[in-house]
Amino acid sequence: MQKFGKFICKYRKLILIITILIAIPAAIGMAKTKINYDILIYLPDNIETIQGENILTGDFQMGAYSIILVDNMPEKEMLRLEEEIRAMDSVAMVGSIADVLGEKIPNEMLPDNIRDVVYKENTTMIMVTFKEGMSSDNTMDTIEKIRKITDERCKISGMAAIILDTKNIFNQEFFIYVIIAVILCFIILELTLDSYVAPIFLLLNIGVAILYNMGTNIFLGQISYITKAISSVLQLGVTTDFAIFLYHSYTQEKSSGKNNEDAMASAIATTIGSVFGSSITTIAGFLALCGMNLKLGADIGIVMAKGVLFGVICVVTVLPAMILCFNGAIEKTKHKSIFPEFKHLKNFVMKHYKATIVIFMLILPFAFYGYKRTEIYYNLDSKLPASLESVDANKDLKEKFDMVSVEMILVDANISTENLNNMTSEINELDGIQWVLSTAKLSETGIPESMIPDSVLSKIETEKYKLVLVSSNYEMATDELNNQIKTVNKIIKKYDNKAILAGEGPLMNDLVEIADHDFNSVNTISIAIIFVIMLVILKSASLPFILMLVIEFAIFINMGIPYYTNTVLPFIASIVIGTIQLGATIDYAILITSKYIAKRKDGIEKKEAIEYALGTSIASIFTSGMCFFGATIGVGLYSKIEIISSICVLLGRGAIISMFSVIFALPAYLMVFDKLVCKTTIGLKKEGGKKNA
């Protein structure tokens, strides 16, 4: 490693030139990486509802739909508006009762049960279906166009409109996320490092790593907006301590009398050895997210694991080159460290370690109780700002038409009229069903199928399938709607065992079931992987248990707080936070433990070994934890997108809780279980045993 370090030092200028040249394609890749705003797209391809979506897109050209609410608009004008919308390339179908009745038949002639579906308080519904999915660029561009050609009398509802508004908010906020994170980390680094200029180069180095990571996302095809939002700030928070470690190693080597190049070569060698174990556990924690059935986990996991890897590479190549090239500026701006040495904190922890154990054991059951009972929600648009056009439209749709969720039933085209009528009638009698519409149902009310224009009929019937629309009063992703969906599924299978219930409601129901499974599996996978890695790194059968206990305790507190504050979390936060917090903050515990083991191997008595390990680690852990906190908490407090805000607040709070948990609880447990550790750790059986008495 020393040779590698000398190579980096020798060719530092060339490395910086190559760094800049690589940044160009990375920036292009970042700009061209498609961002997806629809979480439902990450559901597994093999589930029935996704197959139904594929049929709707392929056979019916119904990749997505929106309902336009039109206030006080004459039929003649509404028909002209429909024609203008119908002419747009991405629009598959535009339909309203005006298409069936035309201009000559007044709506008063309609049966009451049909008129109440389509008319309320001088408001009419126009249904627009799109050829592509709800998160397609073409679909969202078309909604933008519809908004431009309509006036204040028209409101566009539906998930596609929600996704468009989410995209617009995110695009407005993203660069502010980065700015907030950088400013807060810069302030923390200015307080913790001994040079006013050094933090600039540390952050520039991390910025390069983030750019490379975001640029290489183009090879993934697309990433979620959630991934893009949290990956940059998370990479900043997680990899800052790698850069700090190299800088501290460099200054220490220089203080021993070495010249700049020799000091940096030694610092690079030391950093590679020390950061390897730390980065492996962090990467493993992120890769554990790939075990989720919801493919969003793999999206976040791969991008973040890649980000940590780029962070390590840049720390041992780009950062040394920067420091050596600008060493003069760093030296000229040297100052005394503003942060204390934490001697009093170390002494307090060691003096009161027994009380710490007692407090730990008292808090643990309450933390675990809250962790298990924290409520989560799945309907992500429910937490978007009420001022958004789509949210306002969905509110009107619910209040005026009592219409919250629309499902599509795909039945065999050859189903008999009798069976179709019986099926729709049975569904219509269920609690919470607003209405059921099919061609057979219209015929029952006096509107014969012959009156329906072929242009409309062809969109709801194909050679293989007939389409039945079902409207529910129940909110998306609620127990009421999910139970209703299960009942509707049983009914339709009774009349056609190959029938499929599709639409946003069934998709969200699948999301709930898959997320519940992922919550348990991904935490188990992450704990198992990191536990095995610690067994190898620490060469101990007992230490991994102790370290896991300390960090899981911090996770229980972090995830239990919402229960006691009556805060409801987005489902994705409940799944990923534990894994990310474990992978990102277990390093704090490994740092103290590694130093403790080294001293015990040297024959140092347990208390002195733990005091040394704690005393020489507090500053590093505090700096790392505060940078992690700074990189995430500002974004969490600023973002208007609840899912991003919640994740970032939880990550920031988790970093602080883990930091204090490691500083207070880990030394206490090492004091209590030192004999066990010495007996179960390779290399400590003899050395530790001599000084245990």
Image: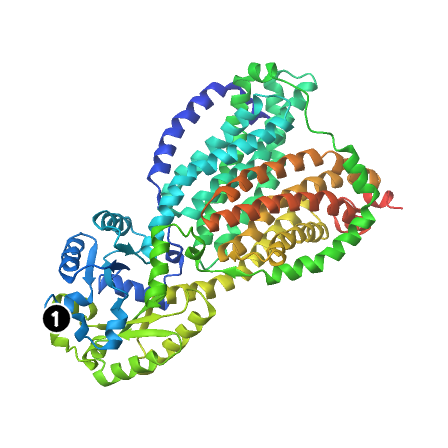
User: For this rendering, which residue is in front, 79 or 477?
Assistant: 79
Q: Position of residue 502 (x, y in %)?
A: 33, 68
Query: In the image as oriented, which residue stretches furthest toward the right?
Result: 693
Q: Which residue shows up at 36% across the image and 64% down it?
A: 398
Q: Is residue 281 visible?
A: no
Q: Is residue 519 visible?
A: yes
Residue 278 drawn above or below residue 58: above
User: What crowding class fits label 1: few (fewer than 14 Cα within 10 Å), some (14-19), or many (20 or more)?
Assistant: few
Find residue 454 and report its image quarter. bottom left
The amino acid marked with disc number 1 is Ile
Q: Position of residue 488 (x, y in %)?
A: 37, 76
Q: Which residue shows up at 63% across the image and 46% down it?
A: 586
Please say which color scheme the image uses.
rainbow
Q: Position of residue 293 (x, y in %)?
A: 46, 60
User: For this rendering, which residue is in front, 389 or 240?
Assistant: 389
Find residue 496 and report its image quarter. bottom left
Q: Which residue shows up at 32% across the image and 67% down it?
A: 401
Residue 54 drawn above or below residue 541: below
Residue 426 drawn above or below residue 396: below
Q: Which residue shows up at 25% across the image and 59% down it?
A: 71
Residue at the disc numbered 1: 105
- Position of residue 349 in the picture relative to residue 413 (left or right): right
Element at badge 1? loop
Residue 167 drawn above or below residue 31: below
User: For this rendering, which residue is in front, 489 or 255?
Assistant: 489
Q: How many marks?
A: 1
Q: Position of residue 75 (x, y in %)?
A: 16, 62
Image quarter (top left, top right, bottom left or bottom right) of the N terminus? top right
- Position of residue 334 in the picture relative to residue 641 (left or right): right
